[in-house]
Amino acid sequence: MDDLRLTSLNLPGIDENKRPLVIAGPCSAETEEQVMATARQLAEKGFKIFRAGVWKPRTKPGGFEGMGETALPWLQRVKEETGMLIATEVAMPKHVEASLKAGVDLLWVGARTTANPFAMQELADSLKGVDIPVLVKNPVNPDIELWIGALQRINGAGITRLGAIHRGFSSIDQKIYRNAPMWHIPIELHRRFPNLPLICDPSHIGGRRDLIAPLCQQAMDMGFNGLIVESHCNPDCAWSDAKQQVMPDVLDFILDRLVVRENVEMTESLSALRKQIDTLDNDLMDLLTRRMRVSREIATYKKEHDMAVVQTGRYSEILDKRGAQGVLCGMDADFVRKIYEAIHEESVRQQMDIINK
């Protein structure tokens, strides 16, 4: 199955033609008081969909893993008292069952779950015969086929009210962002499935409050349909992901200043293409940083074994091999050679600094 059978998300009271569709609320449902305080503040600002994590997958044991089913009545109260729709993350069939029983209006699947086809199939099986919108986050690693496969599994269960959440991709290296945006991947997803709603998660991409606003704007410039943003009544005291949550009034301020261009062609927008260039340039800098780190480790080895810095045979091999590789990739051999000469020059400089210490 290469295609997706899609219908509108059909969320009650939500105009899906108006961008952005916004889903807001705390990372975690911590206490009833925290949930209600945040929900009331968001409702006062006109937000229509409240999100809160009930089950929280943690990287290591011992962290706050959510309040579980205890928190579901709090979400029900949000719905009853504010009229907001309620949304939460599910990772196992029992989460789906409990959420449906509690009247949750929208479900999303987290990045760790998306990366596991077995878990995705179990979720899909638990959703058979159910009519509820489901949003699927990208997997932890930049694998678009894995993302598409997860969407197809949910779609195969009969869920046609389907959307995708872009939350960025994990990396072992420190970057500006908590998770690298790699915008070209959701853009490619949109190219393949132009009717699939795309929701951006600036909280998890940025990992910092000060990055929420520019990431929201980038998402709008690229034609995303909506945003899912973490908002907490007292972010500094949040039990999880405190640094990336903003107060409801701050979120309202950010969204009020968004420039939303309605005539956006996702695959041909000059702005989107320039954003791709910026992202790829950031990736190039990250790769060069990692390459220079390895060069410095080589310098330490050479110093310990009394070896010369420049190994001419190795240098010639790199120039010849990468030049030929560049030609195969449609680039001029001299262009590639100049790049690697410059890289080699900087590598030698850094190695000399270490050897001469």
Image: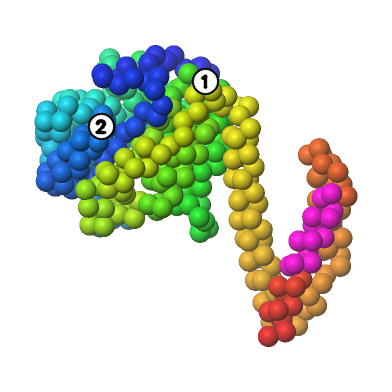
- Which quadrant of the view contains residue 239? bottom left
Q: In which quarter of the image is residue 89?
A: top left
Q: Looking at the image, which residue is at 68% across and 79% down?
A: 354
Residue 88 in percent (x, y) is at 26, 34
Residue 342 sits inside the magenta stretch? yes
Q: Is residue 235 above or below residue 300?
A: above
Instruction: Report the span colored magenta.
Output: 335-347
Q: In the rendered image, which residue does mark 2 sit on?
A: 46
Viewport quadrant of the C terminus: bottom right
Q: Is residue 183 left or right of residue 157?
A: right
- Disc 2 residue type? Gly
Which residue does the image show at 16% across and 47% down from the upper left?
34
N-terminal of the pair, mark 1 or mark 2, is: 2
Identify the mark at residue 194; answer none if there is no mark: 1
Q: Is residue 187 visible?
A: yes
| Residue 259 shown left or right of residue 340 in the figure | left
Label 2 residue SS: loop
